[in-house]
Amino acid sequence: MDLAGRFHAPRSPRFWLAIGIGGLLFRTVHLFFIRDVETGLVWMTKILTDPFSDLKLYYKAPLYLMKGELIDPGLEKHIKHA
């Protein structure tokens, strides 16, 4: 990618993986100093496990969308009508 002939964005997946890992480690250590070690470790664990939690929660969503269900049918159980 060329930005006015001056900047060429790296295309290597390793580069972007390194940027992501660096950001994760930077924020974790940052939280060590501004809060405490436990907060940093909990945040890092949350960031690392979120994709798996999302997959567990939403893996059936495309099937329901293909059947035409745009709203969760079980949602009505939790809504209290006035």
Image (cartoon, grey):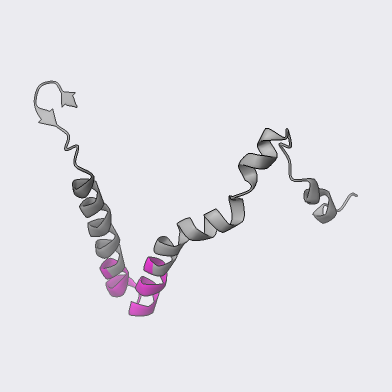
Q: Residue furthest top?
A: 4
**Residue 4, percent from left and from top:** 14, 21
Q: How many marks?
A: 0
- Residue 33 locus on image (x, y percent): 27, 73
Instruction: Locate residue 81, reporting x and y percent.
Output: 89, 49
**Residue lying at the far right of the rendered structure:** 82
44 sits left or right of 65 in the view? left
In which image quadrant can residue 70 be found? top right
**Left or right: where does residue 64 sit relative to residue 41?**
right
Residue 6: in magenta span? no
Where is residue 7? Give x, y as percent: 12, 30
| Placement of 37 over or under 43, stated as above or below | below
User: Where 5 falls versus 31 (above or below)?
Assistant: above
| Residue at screen point 79% across, 51% down | 74
Image quadrant assignment for residue 31: bottom left
- Segment colored magenta: 29-44
Q: Is 54 situated left or right of 3 in this image?
A: right
Name the residue: 27% across, 53% down: 20
Q: Residue 45 versus residue 31: which sits nearer the camera? A: 45
Which of the 4 image quarters holds residue 12? top left
| Residue at horizontal 40 percent and vertical 67 percent from the top | 43
Horizontal side of 56 relative to 44 (left or right) equals: right
Picture residue at 60% right of the left edge, 56% below the top: 57
* Quadrant placement of the N terminus: top left
Principal secondary structure, stretch drawn in magenta? helix
